[in-house]
Amino acid sequence: WTGGASGRERSVDFAGYSFAVLRPRPAPQGRRRPHHLTLDALDMNERVPVIWIIATGSEILQGHYADRNGPWLSEQLKRAGLRTARHMALPDRFEPLCRGLAEARDAADVVIVTGGLGPTEDDLNRQAIAQVWEAPLEESADAIRDIEQRLSHLGRTLLPANRVQASIPRGSTLVHNANGTAPGFFLPPAEGR
């Protein structure tokens, strides 16, 4: 990652592309800012990447909730001059998650996954991503610190269920979450993929 001039910007290179990840501006007084990042594309190298967005959660497939993250991400990518090639929804079950993630890994240059990083037993994204990308999970000291600070701010202490949220695939970069306890992560493509 390299810092941007504004102090709100970080740049990350992957799959032959360089992307700037912008932290959201502070929310107006008394309002909460949504928990998302804005992506602006840089250095496209003539080739448009194939981008898939995967929403995870059985509640989405059962019609209890609509996926609002995928359409929002597609709009942000469109503003950056990029197109989403496919949206996919997957259940909170390990084998279907692995099958869907493997399909995306093999077909797309960029895979964006939303959901499934929380502290509950059905939040299996980190384990499935670790298996599909052959990147074992490791506890991140930075993630533990962030989670402890977030919980302390809420008057709570770190529980084992929260600690699992600090496990990220080996070789990935932590993406801090200012609005919750579950950090995200960026996993660059493996050699040859």
Image: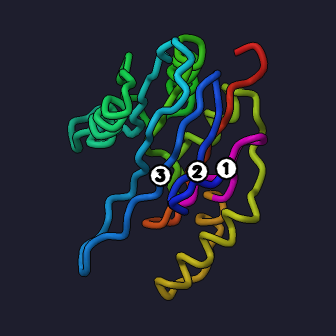
Checking the image for residue 176, the label placed there is none
> Which quarter of the figure has residue 74?
top left
What is the secondary structure assignment of the residue under circle 2? strand
In the image, is residue 125 part of the stretch drawn in magenta?
no
Mark 2 or mark 1: which comes first in sequence?
A: 1
What is the secondary structure assignment of the residue under circle 3? strand
Mark 3 or mark 1: which comes first in sequence?
A: 1
Visible residue check, residue 99: no
Measured in 3D between alpha carbons, the distance from the residue under mark 3 to the one under mark 1, in whole angstroms, is 12 Å
Residue identified by numbered label 3: 22
User: Looking at the picture, does residue 48 appear above or below residue 152?
Assistant: above
Q: Are marks 3 and 2 in contact (CB under 8 Å)?
A: yes
What is the secondary structure assignment of the residue under circle 1? strand
Circle 1 crowding by C-alpha within 10 Å: few under 14, some 14–19, many from 20: few
Rendered location of residue 168, percent (x, y): 69, 48
Residue at (39% x, 58% y) in the render: 35
Q: Are marks 2 and 1 in contact (CB under 8 Å)?
A: yes
